[in-house]
Image (cartoon, rainbow, N blue to C red):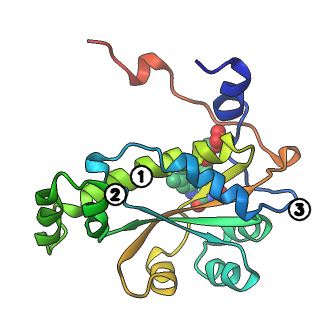
């Protein structure tokens, strides 16, 4: 069981950040985040999440060219921006990650329209992406997720072969708490849950 300090760091005190301190994030920290992220459960152990960490000035500006205006300054300020993407051809690795069920990989391979693969890919990569955000906080960093961008343009720039598709973006760094605004209300248990 996590103590209150850990719960605060991951849930109660942690915030979505739109402003970041001028403090770098190392490759070792990014690897540490992935080390935790990869333990997320996925159906059939499919693991369709792919992450591109954008840090160089050149790559950052390429990314910025796809953003909606309100996301530009925060993304330039963040030391790293992660593109959380899904690999539509995730089944190609299944012989290694789920060797005992070769028929499942074949079912996905035969699904040329993506009607079966698509929802599996989106659901599981989104679960992994949720774990990713928790992992960022567990590593002592902050994030700010963003869907305010031109997905078609970003995918064409970063994934021109069409095999990966972005889901959302996530700025990573040390958030500037002095520039936080009031937190929005969260729904109550009785409004959203039932126990049968
Ligand atoms: C998938 C997703 C997309 C989001 N897109 C944007 C965005 O494009 N721009 C932005 O400034 N904030 C964006 N947000 C931030 C949310 O508004 C913020 O996480 C939410 O208000 C909760 O804030 P809190 O964690 O500080 O309570 C996004 C959050 C998520 C999870």
- Residue that appears at 51% across and 44% down: 131
Q: Nearer the viewer, residue 148 or 44?
A: 44
Label 3's element?
Answer: loop
Indicate which disc residue 122 carries: 2
User: Residue 18: x, y in percent?
Assistant: 73, 55
Q: Nearer the viewer, residue 1 or 167?
A: 1
Q: Which residue is mark 3?
A: 22
Whichever of labels 3 and 1 marks the residue nearer the N terminus, that label is 3
Tell me if label 1 and label 2 are in contact, CB under 8 Å: yes
Q: Quadrant of the C terminus?
A: top left
Distance between the alpha carbons at the discs numbered 3 and 1: 29 Å
Where residue 80 appears, as percent x and y from the top left, is 71, 66
Residue 99 at x, y percent in the picture: 23, 56
Q: Position of residue 14 (x, y in %)?
A: 71, 37
Label 2 crowd (10 A; few <14 / some 14-19 / many >=20): some
Quadrant (top left, top right, bottom left, bottom right) of the N terminus = top right
Label 1 to label 2, Cα distance in Å? 6 Å
Q: Which mark is residue 126?
A: 1
> Left or right: 188 with respect to 61?
left
């Amino acid at each position: 069981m996590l103590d209150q300090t850990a719960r605060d760091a991951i849930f109660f005190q942690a915030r979505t950040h739109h402003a970041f301190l001028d403090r770098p994030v190392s490759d070792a920290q990014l690897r540490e985040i992935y080390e935790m992220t990869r333990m997320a459960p996925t159906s059939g152990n499919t693991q369709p999440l792919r992450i591109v960490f954008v840090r160089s000035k050149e790559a950052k500006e390429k990314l910025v060219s796809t953003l909606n205006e309100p996301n530009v300054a925060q993304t330039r300020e963040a030391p790293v921006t992660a593109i959380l993407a899904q690999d539509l051809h995730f089944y190609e690795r299944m012989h290694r990650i789920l060797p005992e069920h070769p028929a499942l990989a074949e079912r996905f391979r035969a699904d040329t329209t993506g009607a079966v693969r698509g929802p599996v890919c989106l659901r599981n990569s989104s679960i992994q992406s949720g774990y990713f955000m928790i992992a960022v906080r567990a590593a002592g960093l902050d994030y700010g997720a963003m869907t305010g961008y031109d997905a078609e343009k970003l995918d064409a720039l970063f994934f021109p072969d069409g095999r990966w598709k972005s889901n959302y973006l996530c700025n990573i760094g040390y958030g500037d708490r002095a520039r936080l605004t009031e937190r929005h209300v969260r729904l109550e248990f009785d409004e959203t849950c039932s126990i049968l």
